[in-house]
Image (tube, rainbow, N blue to C red):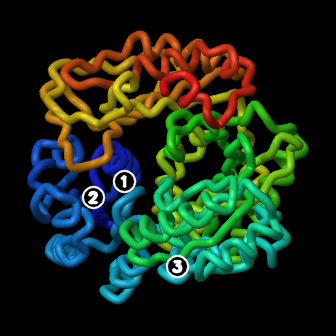
Amino acid sequence: MFETVLIANRGEIAVRIIRACKELGVKTVAVYSKADRDSMHVRLADDAICIGNSPSSESYLHIPAIITAAEIANVEAIHPGYGFLAEDAHFAEICESCHIKFIGPNSESILRMGDKVQARQLAKKAGVPVVPGSEGIVKDKNEALKVVQEVGYPVIVKAVAGGGGRGMRIAHNDLAMVSAFATAQTEAEAAFGRPDVYIEKYLEHPRHVEVQILADTKGNVIHLGERDCTIQRRHQKLLEESPSPAISDDIQKKMCRMAVRLAQESKYVNAGTIEFLVDKDNNFYFIEMNTRVQVEHTVTEMVTGVDIIKEQLRVAFGEPLSVDQKSVRPRGAAIECRINAEDPDRGFVPQGGRVSLYVPPGGPNVRVDSHLYSGYVVPSFYDSLLAKVITFGRDRMEAINTMRRALDEMIIQGVPTTIPFHRRIVDDSRFLRGDYPMNLVEELFE
């Protein structure tokens, strides 16, 4: 196993990776911005190096500073976590050229699967169904209108690169199409450095279901079941659960087989997530692949008992997966609530500040991944995620009841949080039935 790993990230995911490394006997080096000098990941790591000023462009996104820190600390590998540089093919390529192992897929895989048009084409080749849409990049509004004539309204214009809801616009008629196309191109250029977009049929109120896969350098590819990520706000996930309450066992098995097939076809290595949309008739369609560990990987860990971060480390070191498909037997149900420093009653606007009191929930079947402590100052420069509360139950209702208890126990004072929001979600009758729409948050809060 590696002797020393640098974590090119911050917050709860940096803490999560440090814990996995410690359990494997691996030394860790944290990097931090000036705003994060007192952060939990800095305290827990064996060593820590400041890499720049508070803005992420001057620290966590500043590749030369991270590579310099890695060389100073003489690390063998870098774990990028999620966000920041996790899906940056250029960063992975630089790591490779510096003989530093990038704990994730190689730069070629990131580039190929990060390009949604290429990923769609690869999915088609593997026999995985995709949402009807353009064959490739749509160059101008006239070509866009021709595509719409074939697939019909409504449609969604999507950036070829990136994700997180940026560069995505929905259109229901020609006038809206022209505007959506121009706006999506502008957003894509600003967010990802390229204006390329493509078009898909927009599915009304689908379920968002994803499959976790693991693949090693020995040719082994397995899945760890599915997660339902339908509860979102503006394409940002807020609550996830496994298994999905909305799909049958037959659909689940077929979806997982397709995910493995796509990973094999793309010669993918390390952890990844294949994302699907499921329509009202239980037809599912591939939409994209995330070439990194997901925020919600914890849900899968709870139901399978597989430590995904440790598997990433093993695979990156050249070892085979420690589990095979037959030994993966999901049990029970798990739910994750993302606790953000946002006020749902005021448009979910993020807000930093000092946490005057932090009391995490505990007890059986409760897991909390967080970087908080009483007195910690939440910076305003980064994502507003404060903690993830994950609960497990022998069945879905038991997991929900445990989540209710955990949310009632959790105390975060000093900054607004989404705890009351999640409490309302898990009491909603549609959520309890497992029959909730993708716009549930908008219906309840906007």
Identify the residue at image location x=37%, y=51%: 17
Q: Amino acid at mark 1?
A: Cys
Choose between 387 and 218: the one closer to the eye. Answer: 387
Q: Which residue sits at x=16%, y=31%? A: 353
Residue for badge 3: 111
The type of residue carrying mark 3 is Leu
| 231 versus 306 height, above or below | above
Measured as percent of width and height from the top left, residue 19 is found at 35, 45
Check the picture and name the quadrant holding the N terminus: bottom left
Seen in the image, is 14 located left or right of residue 260?
A: left
Residue 295 visible in the picture: yes
Q: Which mark is residue 21?
A: 1
Kindly identify which residue carries mark 2. Answer: 27
Query: How far apart are the two marked residues, 3 and 1, measured between alpha carbons?
Result: 27 Å
Amino acid carrying mark 2 in the image: Lys
Mark 2 and mark 3 lie on one chain; the one further toward the N terminus is: 2
Q: Secondary structure at mark 1?
A: helix
Q: Quadrant of residue 147?
A: bottom right
From the viewer's perspective, is 307 left or right of 216? left
